[in-house]
Image (tube, rainbow, N blue to C red):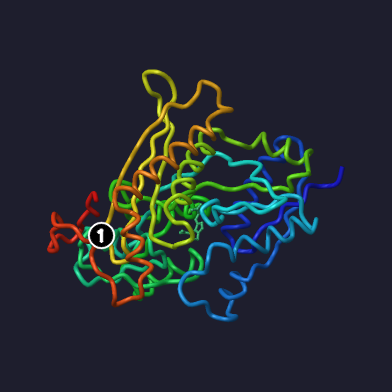
């Protein structure tokens, strides 16, 4: 049988991630071959048309999916957090392998933590989710945008351009550089992006042989966790790019396995935030976990919408300068990190 062709983006992180999937398949006795696909996102990073702000998640994903649908590759590997929450006709999420540490980390000058940085320090991140959550801590640091790969971003610290950068620990760990982090951010303060630290392994829906093979790489606990996080995000966002953080974990409860989910939605400046958490029992059989997880994420998303997330997002979709706080007589306008109040 010909080698299984695994499509990958060209960045070091992407080829490392795809390499992990290839290794796992080789260990199961399958010959593999990595096929590099250049995405529009990569081209713009390499010096083409500069993108303003962060590229939309779809940019990194669509070229790989096109190659998959065209039959140029048999498997596509993505960072799961870069996948849009909607599905693509003809493509299936065949495996979600065991997750890396999902938390965000800080890489700062002189081994500092965020709390040790003096006010006015430049903290670099291109992610609205990280900006909003760090602003909400009220540290007085200056959040500045940054683009480029992990190497470039960390390089800016040594150069002295910035005092700190915020990154996914998983990306550093996959590159063997996790020890360069000077702080691991507590999810109670900074929740990661839905799906962060997990990989998505896709194939064509009609390719039953590849589907069966890839299913052996699937980790039921990771799939349940990211399903809850992504269902929550899909419920909350409805197409709007509000900063949302979410993290789910499987835990051993008294009555059997449970899934815990924590989530936050914020205004861009972090001044308004709504945090909620919930848990649900998981069936004894892993086969029901994805459905249990989708229900947990959907229910918590609906609860957050009812508790003020809908108002918060209505504010976000207004043009800048016209924003006003949600109307509520109990709110404290002076509070820096006010919760969106119950209606
Ligand atoms: N936003 C880009 C991106 N997509 C996936 C990762 C890291 C790996 C992961 O989260 O699985 C990163 C870099 C980062 O956020 O620091």
Q: Is residue 267 left or right of residue 68?
A: left
Q: Position of residue 294 (x, y in %)?
A: 50, 39
Total marks in image = 1
Locate the N terminus by quadrant. top right
Relative height, residue 179 to residue 300 (above, below): below
Observer-nearest residue: 286 or 76?
Answer: 286
Observer-nearest residue: 112 or 269?
Answer: 269
Q: Is residue 240 left or right of residue 6?
A: left
Rendered residue at 76%/47% (across/down): 32
Q: Is mark 1 within 8 Å of ligand 1?
A: no
Q: Is residue 214 left or right of residue 193?
A: right
Q: Position of residue 279 (x, y in %)?
A: 37, 33
Q: Position of residue 53 (x, y in %)?
A: 45, 73
Observer-nearest residue: 109 or 140?
Answer: 140
Relative height, residue 135 to residue 97 (above, below): below
Question: SS class of the residue under badge 1?
Answer: strand
Rendered residue at 42%/36% (across/down): 249
Q: Residue furthest top?
A: 255
Rendered residue at 14%/60% (across/down): 335
Q: Is residue 284 left or right of residue 141?
A: right
Rendered residue at 45%/42% (across/down): 298
Dot 1, crowdedness within 10 Å: few (<14), some or many (≥20)? many
Residue position for label 1: 272
**Quadrant of the rendered image containing residue 122:** bottom left
Q: Position of residue 295 (x, y in %)?
A: 47, 37
């Amino acid at each position: 049988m010909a080698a299984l062709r695994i499509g990958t983006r060209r960045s070091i992180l992407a080829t490392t991630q795809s390499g992990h999937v290839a290794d796992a398949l080789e260990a199961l006795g399958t010959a593999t071959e990595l096929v590099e696909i250049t995405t529009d996102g990569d081209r713009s990073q390499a010096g083409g048309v500069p993108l303003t702000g962060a590229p939309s998640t779809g940019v990194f994903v669509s070229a790989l999916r096109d190659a998959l649908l065209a039959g140029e590759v048999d498997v596509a590997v993505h960072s799961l957090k870069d996948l849009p929450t909607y599905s693509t006709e003809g493509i299936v999420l065949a495996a979600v392998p065991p997750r890396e540490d999902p938390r965000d980390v800080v890489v700062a000058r002189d081994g500092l933590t965020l709390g040790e940085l003096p006010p006015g320090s430049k903290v670099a991140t291109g992610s609205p989710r990280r900006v909003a959550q760090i602003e909400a801590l009220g540290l007085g640091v200056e959040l500045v945008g940054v683009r480029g790969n992990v190497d470039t971003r960390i390089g800016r610290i040594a150069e002295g351009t910035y005092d700190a950068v915020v990154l996914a620990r998983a990306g550093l760990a996959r590159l063997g550089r996790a020890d360069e982090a000077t702080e691991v951010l507590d999810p109670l303060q900074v929740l990661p992006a839905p799906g962060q630290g997990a990989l998505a392994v896709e194939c064509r829906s009609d390719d039953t042989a590849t589907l069966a093979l890839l299913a052996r790489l699937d980790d039921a606990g990771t799939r349940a966790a990211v399903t809850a996080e992504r269902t929550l995000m899909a419920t909350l966002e409805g197409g709007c790019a509000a900063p949302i953080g979410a993290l789910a974990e499987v835990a051993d409860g008294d009555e059997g396995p449970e899934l815990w989910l924590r989530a936050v939605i914020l205004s861009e400046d972090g001044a308004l935030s709504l945090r909620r958490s919930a848990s649900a029992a998981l069936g004894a059989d892993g086969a029901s976990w994805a459905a249990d997880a989708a229900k947990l994420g959907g229910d918590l998303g609906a609860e957050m919408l009812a508790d003020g997330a809908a108002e918060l997002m209505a504010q976000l979709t207004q043009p800048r300068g016209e924003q006003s706080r949600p109307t509520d007589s109990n709110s404290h306008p002076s509070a820096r990190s006010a919760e969106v109040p119950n209606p």
